[in-house]
Image (cartoon, rainbow, N blue to C red):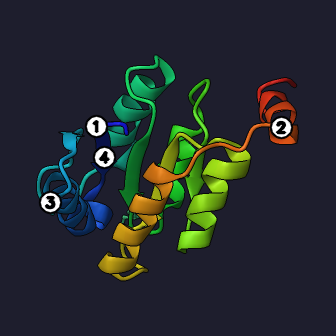
Amino acid sequence: MNRIIPIASDHGGYEMKQFLVEKLKECGYEVYDFGTHSADSVDYPDMIHPLASAISRGEYPLGIILCGSGNGAQMTANHHTHVRAALCWNVELAKLARQHNDANILALPGRFIPFNLAWEMVQAFLSTQFEGGRHTRRVEKIEQF
Ligand code: RB5
C-alpha cells in the first residue's frame, strides 16, 4: 500500500480535501497536504503544479487533486511529464483509470459530488492495480507524439 498520499486543492475543493485528509489519516495513511489551507480564493495551478511536479519526479506513486469542477486541476496536472491525471465522477471510473490508464492522479470535482462518494472513489483508486497487457502499449503512446 502507498502510505504517503499527496493531496492538493484550491478553495473550490478545500472542504472536500479536508474531509479526505481526515479519512486517509483514520485509515493509517500519511498525508502530504500541498494546500490550500483555507477557504479563501486562490488560483488552482499554485497548488496543483507542485503536487504534479512531485508525481512527475517519482516522489509519490499516486496523488489526489481537487478543484470546484475538477477540470482546472486535471488540466494543470496533465501538463507534467509522466503525469496521468483522471477526472472521475464515480467509483467505476476511478477503478478504470487505474486498471486501463495507469492514472497516477485522481482529480475530483469538489463542488459536485457527495463527500462520501469522493472517499469511496479515493479508496478504489488507491487499491486498484494497473492491468498492464494491451493497456501498457496504449499508455506508453500517450507521451509519444
Ligand atoms: C473556482 O471558482 C473554480 O473555478 C475552480 O475551483 C475550478 O472549478 C476550475 O476548474
Whichever of callouts 4 and 3 sits on the residue coming sooner in the sequence is 4
Element assignment for label 1 = loop
Separation (CA) of disc 4 from disc 1: 16 Å
Give the residue number, with chain letter if any, for mark 1.
3
Dividing the picture into quadrants, the one containing residue 89 is bottom right
Element assignment for label 3 = helix
Separation (CA) of disc 3 from disc 2: 36 Å
Whichever of callouts 4 and 2 sits on the residue coming sooner in the sequence is 4
- Circle 3 crowding by C-alpha within 10 Å: few under 14, some 14–19, many from 20: few
Badge nearest the viewer, 4 or 3 = 3
Q: Nearer the viewer, residue 58 or 69?
A: 58
Which residue does the image show at 25% across and 52% down from the upper left? 42
Which residue does the image show at 30% across and 46% down from the upper left? 8
Give the residue number, with chain letter if any, for mark 4.
8
Q: Position of residue 53 (x, y in %)?
A: 43, 25
Q: Amino acid at mark 2?
A: Gly
Badge nearest the viewer, 3 or 1 = 1
Separation (CA) of disc 4 from disc 2: 31 Å
| CB contact under 8 Å: marks 4 and 2 | no
Q: Position of residue 79 (x, y in %)?
A: 59, 33
Q: Position of residue 112 (x, y in %)?
A: 43, 80
- Circle 1 crowding by C-alpha within 10 Å: few under 14, some 14–19, many from 20: some
Separation (CA) of disc 4 from disc 3: 14 Å
Q: Amino acid at mark 4?
A: Ala
**Which disc is residue 133 wearing?**
2
- Circle 4 crowding by C-alpha within 10 Å: few under 14, some 14–19, many from 20: many
Q: Position of residue 94 (x, y in %)?
A: 56, 62
In the depicted structure, whether residue 110 falls above or below residue 64: below
